Image (tube, grey):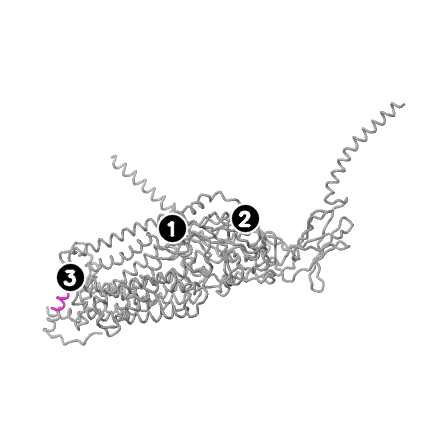
Amino acid sequence: MEKEDDKSDRRKFLKLGALAGGVVLLGTAIGKAVSSGETKETGEKVKVLTTDGKVVEVNSSAISHPASNQPVHLPVREGISGKKFVRVIDLARCGNARKCIEGCQKSHNVIAPVEYIKVKKMQETEDSSPFWLPQMCFHCDNPPCTKVCPVDATFKRSDGIVAIDSDRCIGCRFCMAACPYSARVFNWGTTVQSKYTTDHQDTIPENYCPTPQIPVGTVSKCDFCPDRVSKGILPACVMSCPNGTIFHGDQNEDTVTNGEDTFRLSELLKNRGGYRLMEDLGTEPRVYYLPPVNRNFPFEEDSEKHNTEDYKII
Amino acid sequence: MTNNFKTNWIGKLLIAATFSMPICLFAQDKKTSEKKDATPVAASMKLNFAEVDSVKVINVSLAAGEKPLEGIEVKFYVKRSLSLLPLISNGKGVSTDEKGGASVKFPKDLPGDCNGTIVVIAKVEDDENYGSFETKDSVKWGTIISISAQEEEWEKRSMSGTGSRVPTFLIATAGVIIIVVWGILLYVIFSLVGIKKAGIIKKQ
Amino acid sequence: MNQEHQILTPELIEKQSIRREEMRADLLRPLDKLGMLGKLWIAFLLIIFLIGCYAYYLQLKHGLIETGLRDYASWGLYISTFVFLVAVSLVGALISSILRFTHFTWNRPIMRISEIVAVAGVIWAGLIIIIDMGRPDRVLNLFIHPRLQSPILWDVVVVSTYLVTSVLLLYLPLLPGIAFLRDRLVKIPKWQKWMYKFLSLGWNGTQEQWTILKRGIRLLAIIIIPLALSIHTVTSWLFAMTLRPGWDSTNFGPYFVAGAFLAGTAGVILAMYVFRKAYHLEKYITEVHFDNMGKLLVLLAFIYAYFNVNEYFVPYYKMKGAEAAVLNDLFSGNFAGLYWSAQIFGMFLPAVFLMFKKMRTPGFVTLIAVPVLIFAWVKRFLIVTPTLLHPYLPIQNVPESWKNYFPSWVEISIVSASFAGVLLIITIFSRFFPIISIWETLENEGIELEDLDKLKKENV
């Protein structure tokens, strides 16, 4: 008798377990099928006027706000509608302060030797003067990196930004091999550096780019700080530079600014002879450089070596 | 009689003091509030948009009440999403003339928002007499950039596009090759079933 | 193809049957008990393999930081080995299929050896590319979110197709052999007997079965040739589709394919020699075979040399900016020793030596094939790493170790384990299946097994 009771209890429990499991599976399947994965629908409802004069309420994610200051909740893969982000870097101003690197690292929660923006000493010819070149991902219009990604983990958005989906990246590093500007970095593993990222994930200041910390085994790079910009705040590197070297802006507004000075993009490029790095590769970068002429201060060699320590495995 | 005169005098003084204090204070307040517009009437700015000989001109007139303000430097900006774009380079401003007016040419090719609207801001910064003040207004003088054309361009099929935007020739070529090759492979694999069958029949 | 059918008189049938039985006996012997040497060999391979498994466990635990790879040299030993294994696996198509359509018959006894080398190579190529991934747990993303514009996806498709085709090309000609083992071997474990029964698909040597078999083999042999060419061309596009100096070459497709045939041939020569000695197959893998393989090696080496000249002399003439840096590193810099050894000892000298008939003895041909194979791997490494260490923009402000590439012990053990894995597959295969295709060899001698079977049944 006891045995039978046990059996029936067990059966009941198993049945319940199976039912629960089935419901969970079904729910997940339905949930997955319903949510396309990328679309982030907000809870906000907005009243809009339809073309035939009716007032309806729609989800705010369905509205696009071209060239306005409103933060936009658009699907991440499509980008902020109406924007075409662009940068101009004035090489006459760069003095190798490396504050842009620091600011970017702080705002993306990484520490040395991970650098999304690098400052390099360049010299065009033997007889030319050397100069400092800050360089980050150029978010090219003909990106060699997005072409080779096998899983669509890196992609070009409509607002010009080349973004990375850290949840999809399989870590094949083909995009790193394809980028001729060596703009991308890889999270090689559970090191002291990546632990820093995990530990400080929740202590980041309010206006930081909420780009998730780079998961282990995936690729990362400069992302033009779209979340800061959509809140009206300039990217971290732009604000950190003491010399105002980096100008950030929107090609559709024909304006770039470094926080203090604002210029018309077209005029700046025309009057100051703007150019792009390795134009002949055909990548069509979205970052322009202004030649290092009439410099603010003479070139000075770096006084110290940076990033001398390699990763430390935990 | 002297006493009366004295008390009268002291009393009058006291009364005068008592009354003048609030008046002083009141006058003081008025003075501090009018330090911004030191004259009894506040300074005002008004923007006005005109087109002269197909040249677009922005005019601003400064006045303190009735009196036009002359010689005050006004800077003109266009509002952008991250900053203010000066309409005159080198951070210069335009001094108001004797009529209190200042004007600046508006460039023909400045992009506006999706309707071509531009928000113009005229600012006076740290004037010694009047301090800082500004005014803004919008006008439909901006060029309209076709966002839909840009998005169409972005959505085109290309090698650098997403997986859903594969160039047609690539799908076609890859598809044909895969279908043909795997067709042959599957045919061979299924023919193995034929071998098994032939063996079974024979055994019987 | 085959010699003219001789008139099948009873005496001839008798003679041919004896010949067949002789061959079967010879080829059954290796499937017997494992000798001491065999046991040591497998133990040795297993040890290397297990060390590699532990190394991979560490890599899974800590991430790719366990390797010597860093942001600049982001591809290294794993990718080089991947390209090498894909290269070696082309030999299956060469010996088994391309030569099948020629009038050559000498290649018959070594067709199965080539196929198993190819299958083992391509299996481990697929495994090592997964080992190189930063997130192997997301490998399914390749199938859920594929991007057809990516050369990696083309590589996945082509490599898996080639794997299936090679396995089929190994299996189909093996069917009569498996059936024979099923019928003949008695003192084997139950599971082995069951395996033969299952795999033999009821093979009885009937006319119908032979027809299906031969048609299948012919079809496979036809499609595997363009498949083999595309597998290595697409692999070369992993490099050629980028803008990097040293990789931005239109020559890569044929350059890689030519090198692949050379490397694979060297690999098969090695396998031939080992099997000949270990299984006493001197009657079947004869001196003639080594002579011919030696000649083939010369031909392939010269073709490869032609593509090497195009690949290195042309940019050397121009010394274009970024490419100059890579070339200088290869010709006279850090990689000079490896580069010139690979070119001289891995390609040039072998070709020169093997031009002389006196040099084409089994021992000597094998001796020469060894450096060809080793330097084939070195050459792939020299294609991958120097380019990555010379990007367009200078490498500055990084730890010293990032400016070079030295593989860690984890990488070296995993790569060794992959080679051990290839050898294990080949060894284990040869212990369960005859390493020489009996019927195809007999066909070579004018004996159509299907006729034999048919007549035998009629006579019985």
Q: Out of B13 and A14, give the one closest to the viewer.
A: B13
- Say if C387 sits above or below A35 in the image: below
Q: Is residue C54 magenta?
A: no
Provide the residue designation for mark 1: C65
Q: Is residue C369 left or right of residue B172?
A: left
Amino acid type for the residue under numbered disc 2 = Lys
Which disc, if any, is residue C28?
3
Q: Are marks 2 and 1 in contact (CB under 8 Å)?
A: no
* Mark 2 vs mark 1: in front: 1
Q: Are marks 3 and 1 in contact (CB under 8 Å)?
A: no
Q: Label 2, label 1: how many angstroms apart (C-alpha)?
A: 47 Å
Q: Label 3, label 2: how many angstroms apart (C-alpha)?
A: 79 Å
**x and y percentages locating residue A221 in the rendered image:** 47, 54
* Mark 3 vs mark 1: in front: 1
Amino acid type for the residue under numbered disc 1 = Ile
Circle 3 Cα neighbour tier, 10 Å, few/some/many (<14 / 14–19 / ≥20)? some
Q: Secondary structure at mark 3?
A: helix
Figure quadrant of the C terminus of chain A:
top left
Determine the chain carrying the residue at label 1: C
Circle 2 Cα neighbour tier, 10 Å, few/some/many (<14 / 14–19 / ≥20)? few
**x and y percentages locating residue A202 in the rendered image:** 47, 43
* Mark 3 vs mark 2: in front: 3
Does residue A143 appear in the picture of this structure?
yes
Q: Is residue A192 left or right of residue C204?
A: right
Which disc, if any, is residue A45?
2
Range of residues picked out in magenta: C18-23
